[in-house]
């Protein structure tokens, strides 16, 4: 399409329909702890309302060579206004956070700035519309960065020391537990050995008492047997007893004679109890041998 006009009494503006990119770099934004932050980013925008833009920014077209210069100037003006508004939003975000939080919030800053710029009424009044916002870098000043690096280095070293300390404590605690278990085992073994020793002593004592009791019972039985024999012999005539002894009569025969004499003199003896155990003792080989 060809348009003819008289440049003496007619003005014409040519507004581009392409998108524009403007780069920004802010190095004087302060955090809540008064540290300077460097922010670099890029904003893409388009002209949404051509009439508003043409009324505020010079896009007048007089000649092709002159228009190129106008377009460069217009782009600079739009970019300047966009970046000024972006700095205001960046400052709002950064001023509310300390330097460490800002450094680690690059994505949050990009999302915040994008929302701020797309809803900014001043940008809409210019007839512009922000399409995308990118944050390329967020970094502290050189002095702050060195200080942070030093603090981080110290923190890492401290964490390493703490880790070594914890490992040593864990090893010491483990060794203590092992020694404690060994000691408890030794104590249990000693206690068990003591119990066994006491049990052996008790059994030995009981065995000694039992043997002593048996020997006493045997001695009492033998003493009683001798008493009975002597009592039986008391009624035997001395001459008869002497004759028997001289004739070499053995003990069993002598005992039999004594009991025969007892039987003949029951009226003189009174009561005499002779148990089967006593008879067995009197007739045993031990009695015979002793006699």
Image (cartoon, rainbow, N blue to C red):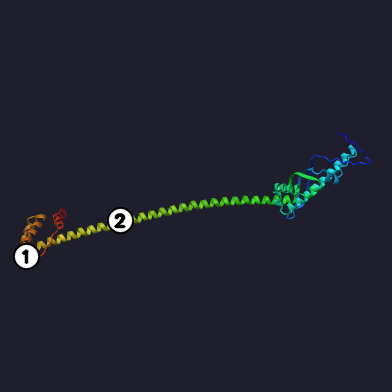
Task: State which mark lies toward you, 2 or 1.
Answer: 1
Q: Earlier in the sequence, mark 2 or mark 1?
A: 2
**Quadrant location of the C terminus?**
bottom left
Q: Which mark is residue 267?
A: 1
Examine the rendered structure and indicate whether residue 238 appears above or below residue 136.
below
Name which residue lies at 41% across and 54% down: 188
Callout 2: SS: helix
Q: Position of residue 156 (x, y in %)?
A: 65, 50
Name which residue lies at 10% across and 61% down: 232
Where on the picture, by quarter, is residue 222? Answer: bottom left
Give the CA distance from mark 2 to mark 1.
51 Å
**Circle 1 Cα neighbour tier, 10 Å, few/some/many (<14 / 14–19 / ≥20):** few
Per the image, the residue denoted by label 2 is 204
Where on the picture, by quarter, is residue 227? Answer: bottom left
Q: Nearer the viewer, residue 85 or 146?
A: 85
Q: Which mark is residue 277?
A: none
Q: Position of residue 54 (x, y in %)?
A: 85, 44
Q: Position of residue 257 (x, y in %)?
A: 7, 57
Q: Nearer the viewer, residue 20 or 120?
A: 120
């Amino acid at each position: 399409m060809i348009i003819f006009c008289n440049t003496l009494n007619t003005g014409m503006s040519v507004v581009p329909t392409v998108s524009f990119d403007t780069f920004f770099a802010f190095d004087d934004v302060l955090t809540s702890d008064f540290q300077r932050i460097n922010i670099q980013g890029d904003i893409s925008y388009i002209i949404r309302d051509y009439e508003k833009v043409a009324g505020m920014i010079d896009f007048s077209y007089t000649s092709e060579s002159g228009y190129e210069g106008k377009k460069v100037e217009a782009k600079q003006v739009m970019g300047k206004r966009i970046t000024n508004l972006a700095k205001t939003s960046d400052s709002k975000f950064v001023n509310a956070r300390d330097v460490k939080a800002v450094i680690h919030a690059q994505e949050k800053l990009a999302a915040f700035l994008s929302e701020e710029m797309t809803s900014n009424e001043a940008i809409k009044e210019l007839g512009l519309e922000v399409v995308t916002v990118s944050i390329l870098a967020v970094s502290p000043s050189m002095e702050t960065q060195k200080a942070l690096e030093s603090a981080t280095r110290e923190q890492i070293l401290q964490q390493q020391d703490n880790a070594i300390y914890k490992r040593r404590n864990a090893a010491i605690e483990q060794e203590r537990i092992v020694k404690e278990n060994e000691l408890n085992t030794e104590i249990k073994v000693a206690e068990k050995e003591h119990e066994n020793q006491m049990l052996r002593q008790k059994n030995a004592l009981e065995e000694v008492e039992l043997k002593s009791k048996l020997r006493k019972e045997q001695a009492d039985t033998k003493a009683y047997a001798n008493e009975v024999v002597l009592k039986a012999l008391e009624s035997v005539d001395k001459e008869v007893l002497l004759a028997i002894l001289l004739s070499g009569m053995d003990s069993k025969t002598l005992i039999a004679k004594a009991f025969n004499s007892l039987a003949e003199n029951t009226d003189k003896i009174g009561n005499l109890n002779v148990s089967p155990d006593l008879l067995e003792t009197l007739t045993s080989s031990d009695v015979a041998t002793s006699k």
